[in-house]
Structure formats: structure tokens, C-alpha cells
Amino acid sequence: MAKLNSLFKFEGTLEDVTAYKRKGTIFLRKKGGVSKDRIMSDPKFARVRENNAEFGETRKSVKVVRDAFSMVSKIVKVGEFSPKLMRSFTQIKNMDTTSVRGERKVAIGIATAEAKRKLIGVEFGESSSLFSTLSKQLSVDPNNGSITITDLIPKDEVNAAAGSNKVGFQAVWARIHFDDKTYNTVMSNEVRVSLDPTPTTVTLTFAAPPAGTGGALILVLSIYFLQMINGQDYLLQNNTFNAAAIIQVV
């Protein structure tokens, strides 16, 4: 793979060279390789077909999680979330011990407690981490999804964004069926507190669990920063310091 480093930049295909942009840089790639028809029919490429099938299935699992928690991307600068999820789901797919190669699925692998733990701690933020932004321990009720942060001292236990004087908390809870890629999502109440030394207990609750039965229940906590001016809260335009992560999967 080559980088295009000149005044003449283009994207697309020119004869047998394809140019494409990734993160602001133009890369060149020569066309060629094994034809799709051969890959789909030649016995020599059986492993490739199996890997491609499982990759496609895993990628669909990543997409359904992104869709279920799409509201998080509105306040958190999401960057490498999909690759992080892909790594976790690849491991989870490999925990499907009942299906043959090429047919292993996240929906089967995630049934075990060990597989669910693979998702806990996955961060949404590109440049921020929930667990470095919030240094106070939190507790989660697995039955109703409620989150409690007891006696939080915001000034000392929150790594605040420059220019903010308040911090907000909200959780999103989703029931995801990885077999048919469907989901139901509910949101908790919001709690906003001043970034001062006053101890405050933050409690996030849900009116009810996500609708339906079965599937995996995935809980995400978001933390974001605001500036209060003349009694009015304003979200900071730069959401780089806002953070979110998966904190429970059951």
C-alpha cells in the first residue's frame, strides 16, 4: 500500500490503480487478486468463505449495538468504538462451541457469563475514558439497572473538561437479540451536579426494563460536561471530554 504525496490528489480508480482517503491521507492500491467467483466456488478457499461468513455475522452484531446506543454518539465523540466492539465480538463468536466453522454466531457465544464479561468496559469515546474521567466507584443493581454513585465529590473525583462548571450523568439500557438483530432501548433520568466539593449521591433509575424477554441486557453509562451561565445549562460544544462505556451485561 502506498501513500499519494504530491500536488495531484484524486480518489477513485484510474486504470488498475485505486485511490482512497483514510483519516485525511490518500492511499493507493493496485487492482488485482483472486476473483470473487473463484473465492466463492474453489474448494481451496473454503476457509476464506468460512471466515468471511463469520466476519459478516460479527459485523452485523457490531451494527446492532451501535444502532441501539445511537443516542450516546450525540454527546460523546465516538471514534474507535466499532473496532473495539469488533475485537470483543470476534472473541465472543469464538465461544460458540456448538456451531461448525463458518456458522459460529455472537448470539450463541454471548450466552455464557465469560462472554458477557468481554463487553464490560468497552469505551465509546475516541479520546476519553469513563473510568479515567470518573474516579469514584459506582454500583449497579442487576435486577433493575439502577446505578448509584455514593457521596461523589465532583471537584475531586471527576476529571472535568476545561470551561465546565457542571457534570451530567445518564444511562442507557438496551435489550439486544443478536439472533435477529433487534433491540429495545430505555433511558434513565438525568442527574446534573455542580463541580464543587459538596458530596452528592448520584442515582440513575429506569421506569422499567427494556421491553421484551431474552436477549442480552447491556447497560451504558454516559458522563458529560456543561457550563451554567445565569442559571441556564449549556452543553460544551467540544464533546471530546464526554465519555461513555458499557458497565454491565446480563
Image: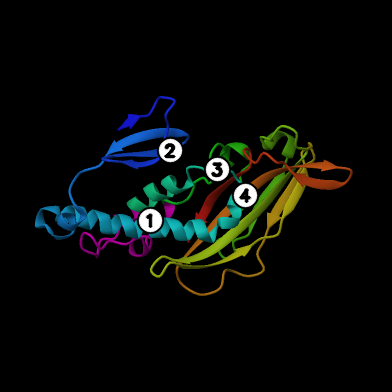
Name the amino acid, label 2.
Answer: Arg
Asked if residue 47 lies left or right of residue 78, the reply is left
Label 2 environment density (alpha carbons within 10 Å; few <14, some 14–19, many ≥20): few
Asked if residue 52 is positioned above or below residue 127 in the image, the reply reads below
Look at 60% across and 58% down and name the residue there: 172
Quick check: is 44 in the magenta stretch?
A: no
Q: Which residue is mark 1?
A: 59
**Distance Cα–Cα, label 3 vs label 1:** 19 Å
Q: Which residue is mark 4?
A: 222
Name the amino acid, label 1.
Answer: Arg
Q: Please state the extent of the stretch shown in magenta in the rendering.
A: 92-117
Element at badge 3? Answer: loop
Q: Residue 64: x, y in percent?
A: 46, 61
Q: Which mark is residue 125?
A: 3
Tell how many labels: 4
Look at 27% across and 61% down and name the residue there: 104
Mark 3 or mark 2, which is nearer to you? Answer: 2
